[in-house]
Amino acid sequence: MKTEPSRWIPFFVLAAAFLLIISCAGPGRQIPDEVSQPEDGRDLSVADEMPETRPEEIPEEDPVTDKTPVPAKQAMAIPEEIRGIWVTRWDYDSPDDIIFIMDRIAAAGLNTVFFQVRGRSDAFYQSSLEPWAAELTGILGQDPGWDPLEVAVNAAHSNGLAIHAWINTLTCWSGAPPPDDTDPQHIYHAHPEWFQINSQGRLLGSPGDYIFLCPANPAVRDHVTSVAGEIAAGYAIDGLHLDYIRYAGTDFSYDKVSRYRYVAENRRGLNRAEWQREELNELVRMIRDRLKRIDENLLFTAAVWGIYIDRWGWNSSQGYYNYYQDSLAWINKLDMDAVCPMTYWSIGGRPDFEALVTDFINNAGKDGILPGIKCDYPTFDEIKRQIALCREKDTRGFLLFAYSTLKEKNYWDDLTRYLAATAVTAETSGTGSSRTLP
């Protein structure tokens, strides 16, 4: 029987096209030879070869946070003076603890709470991205049956307090043993290639230190930004507060992705320190953009190293040089609402609280500074002096570290009396334009 060519030609054309598509397709290109799981010695060798491909681009849309409706929020006037306090993840064990904490903070005359909800890439809130923190039940990943952030938001707002969710941004784990297997899987097990590694191929400076995630890895930035977005989209918070938003030290990070990207994608020819600062800045920029897409009124702040640059010869570690943390750029270029320098020294000391606060004001403006005040001085007098100095210099407010320290030092009554005697008369902004918190 004679074959009709006209019927078979389309078949061969389609078959050839199908084979071409199959040959071009394949698994996504990934960086090969991921860093293996560290043993107890935390020793990871640094391979000499560079990976041949770069990581995947970060998606413009995050499926977790961009499609989640923001909880209804009651607008609150932004205080003229933010009188804040850090509440750490070790300060509470139950809903009653949190309710008591918020009652006490409000009674003392403070008006803003920075409430910790992420410590070691874990969650003190309902998360689809990271496991429940072990501090809540003794077992990593176990649902405690209650939601600390939800309780804190409700208790804070019922007391007229603003609440900012405080997250450890780049800390992954600390100490031994490693985390248990969980669902969702902890980053320690799921992505050891995300770790910061020093030039000797090690994770930690000393036993007990935090293992840090590397902000130069686009996958890390993507994940951390999603965590921030998940919190902002899921809870009626008034702000998001970053901590540990830095490199682990001067000798970090020589992980595989950083070494590759510094060579292959450093188009501006920056030296390594400059490049790492820019990579950290990019993470700050991404989180800011995600937050503003969710709620443009959220306040965005960060706890930063208390000494930006040592201009006084104190021989102290510096955020800019030792941790590649350009916190002034976050205020001056990246529209962060405020940085909270951890200025944990006395007035007139070495380092000097007053000199440091003045330096931040001179370089970032008084409205962008919330000085951190430690509360473990031998007497309450030094805390009073530092609050008074912040007011004299008209900073945006002050931030006390921490709730538990005031309790241990028995300073709550002193604080309550002092704030009552020196109450700020103009409680809300008098700029003429009405600013509101979500």
Image (cartoon, rainbow, N blue to C red):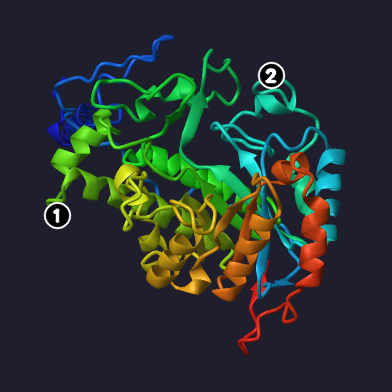
Do the residues under discs 2 and 1 have CB atoms within 8 angstroms?
Answer: no
Residue 402 relative to residue 208: left or right: right
What residue is drawn where x is 64% and y is 68%?
A: 388
Is residue 225 positioned above or below 110 on the image? Answer: above
Coordinates of residue 175 in the picture (x, y in percent) = 52, 19
Question: What x and y, as percent, mark residue 426?
Answer: 72, 81
Measured from the top left, where is residue 127 in percent x and y? 64, 37
Q: Which mark, residue 139?
A: 2
Residue 29 visible: no
Question: Residue 42: x, y in percent?
Answer: 39, 15
On-image quarter of the C terminus: bottom right
Q: Which residue is mark 1?
A: 268
Q: For numbered disc 1, what is the local secondary structure? A: loop
Q: Nearer the viewer, residue 132 or 106?
A: 106
Residue 312, image quadrant? bottom left
- Amino acid type at image mark 2: Ile
Q: Residues within 10 Å of mark 2 (few under 14, many from 20)?
A: some
The answer to whether one can see residue 77 in this image is yes
Q: Amino acid at mark 1?
A: Arg
In the picture, the quarter occupied by the N terminus is top left
Q: Which mark is residue 93?
A: none
**Residue drawn 22% across the image and 29% down it:** 15
**Front one among 318 and 22:** 318
Q: Nearer the viewer, residue 196 or 324?
A: 324
State how many labels appear.
2
Q: Earlier in the sequence, mark 2 or mark 1?
A: 2
Identify the element where label 2 is drawn: loop
Mark 2 to mark 1 CA distance (whole Å): 47 Å
